[in-house]
C-alpha cells in the first residue's frame, strides 16, 4: 500500500476502522432492493439500532463507496472487496443503465419509482475510473507510485532528490518520514512559454 505517516500500530488501527466503515456501507447496499446505497442515512449509537435510518433514498452514482473498496482491495489484496464492487456494478447495469448512459435512482428501496434523468460528470471521471482500477491489473496506477486527488486524478510520487527544482511544485506534501513528496511535473520552460504567449495575445488584442 501507500506509505503512510504514523506508527505501525496506528496504521493498523486506521485500517481496521476503514474496514468496519466499508462493511457498514456494504450492509446498506446489500439490504437495499436495488443493491445500491442511499444518498443520506442517519446512524445511531444505540445498540438496538442495527441499521441506519435512511433520510434520503435517492442514488446519485457517487464514487466514494467504490473508491473505498478499491483502496482497501489494493491495501489488503482481499478478493472480497472485488466481489463487493462487482455486486454494485451489476446493480448499476440492472437499474441505472440507459440507452445513452446511466442515471441515478429516485428511491433505492423501490427502483420502480424510476430514474433521475441526470448523469453527473463525476460518474465517468471518478466512479467508473475506480471500477476500472478495482478490476484492472494490481500494478496499474500503483498506490506506491501514485496518489489520487479527491477528483480521482492520479499524481505521481517522486523521490525527494536533487533536481526537483526543475519542477513547478503546485502540490508538495510529505507522505512519509521523508522518502516521498507529491509533486506535479511542470517544467519552467513550459511556464515561460505560457507567460510569453499571454503577453503576445494581450498585445495583439490591444493593437
Image (spheres, rainbow, N blue to C red):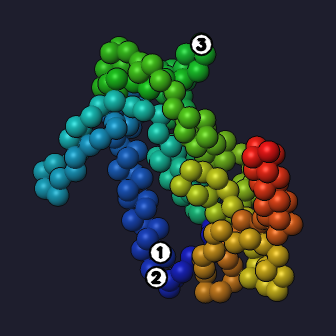
76 left or right, relative to 47 = right
Q: Is residue 83 visible?
A: no
Q: Circle 2 is placed at which residue position?
A: 9
Q: Please state the horizontal and vertical placement of residue 63, each as a whole percent of the image.
A: 50, 43
**Does dot 3 land on a helix, a strand or a loop?**
loop
Residue at image coords 67%, 77%: 181
Residue at image coords 84%, 82%: 163
**Does dot 1 land on a helix, a strand or a loop?**
helix
Residue at image coords 13%, 56%: 46
Mark 1 and mark 2 in contact (Cβ < 8 Å)? yes
167 left or right, relative to 149 = right
Q: Is residue 18 visible?
A: yes
Rounded to the nearest angstrom, the CA distance separating label 2 from label 1 is: 5 Å
Rounded to the nearest angstrom, the CA distance separating label 1 from label 3 is: 45 Å
Q: Circle 3 is placed at which residue position?
A: 99
Q: Which image quadrant: the C terminus?
A: top right
* 196 up-or-down from 114: above or below: below
Q: Please state the horizontal and vertical placement of residue 151, each as a whole percent of the image.
A: 56, 50
Rounded to the nearest angstrom, the CA distance separating label 2 from label 3 is: 49 Å
In the rendered structure, which disc, 2 or 3, sits on the residue that comes first in sequence?
2
Q: Quadrant of residue 26?
A: top left
Amino acid at each position: 500500500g501507500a506509505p503512510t505517516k504514523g506508527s505501525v500500530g496506528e496504521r493498523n488501527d486506521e485500517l481496521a476502522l476503514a474496514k468496519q466503515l466499508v462493511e457498514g456501507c456494504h450492509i446498506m447496499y446489500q439490504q437495499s432492493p436495488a443493491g445500491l446505497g442511499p444518498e443520506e442515512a442517519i446512524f445511531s449509537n444505540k445498540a438496538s439500532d442495527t441499521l441506519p435510518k435512511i433520510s434520503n433514498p435517492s442514488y446519485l452514482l457517487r464514487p466514494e463507496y467504490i473508491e473505498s473498496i478499491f483502496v482497501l482491495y489494493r491495501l489488503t489484496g482481499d478478493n472480497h472487496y472485488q466481489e463487493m464492487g462487482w455486486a454494485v456494478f451489476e446493480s448499476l447495469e440492472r437499474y441505472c443503465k440507459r440507452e445513452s448512459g446511466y442515471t441515478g435512482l429516485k428511491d433505492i428501496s423501490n427502483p420502480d419509482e424510476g430514474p433521475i434523468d441526470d448523469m453527473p460528470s463525476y460518474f465517468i471521471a471518478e466512479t467508473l475510473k475506480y471500477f476500472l482500477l478495482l478490476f484492472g491489473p494490481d500494478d496499474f496506477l500503483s498506490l506506491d507510485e501514485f496518489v489520487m486527488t479527491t477528483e480521482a486524478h492520479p499524481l505521481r510520487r517522486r523521490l525527494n532528490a536533487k533536481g526537483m527544482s526543475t519542477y513547478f511544485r503546485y502540490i508538495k506534501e510529505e507522505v512519509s518520514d521523508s522518502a516521498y513528496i507529491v509533486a506535479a511535473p511542470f517544467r519552467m520552460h513550459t511556464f515561460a512559454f505560457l507567460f510569453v504567449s499571454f503577453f503576445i495575445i494581450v498585445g495583439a488584442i490591444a493593437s
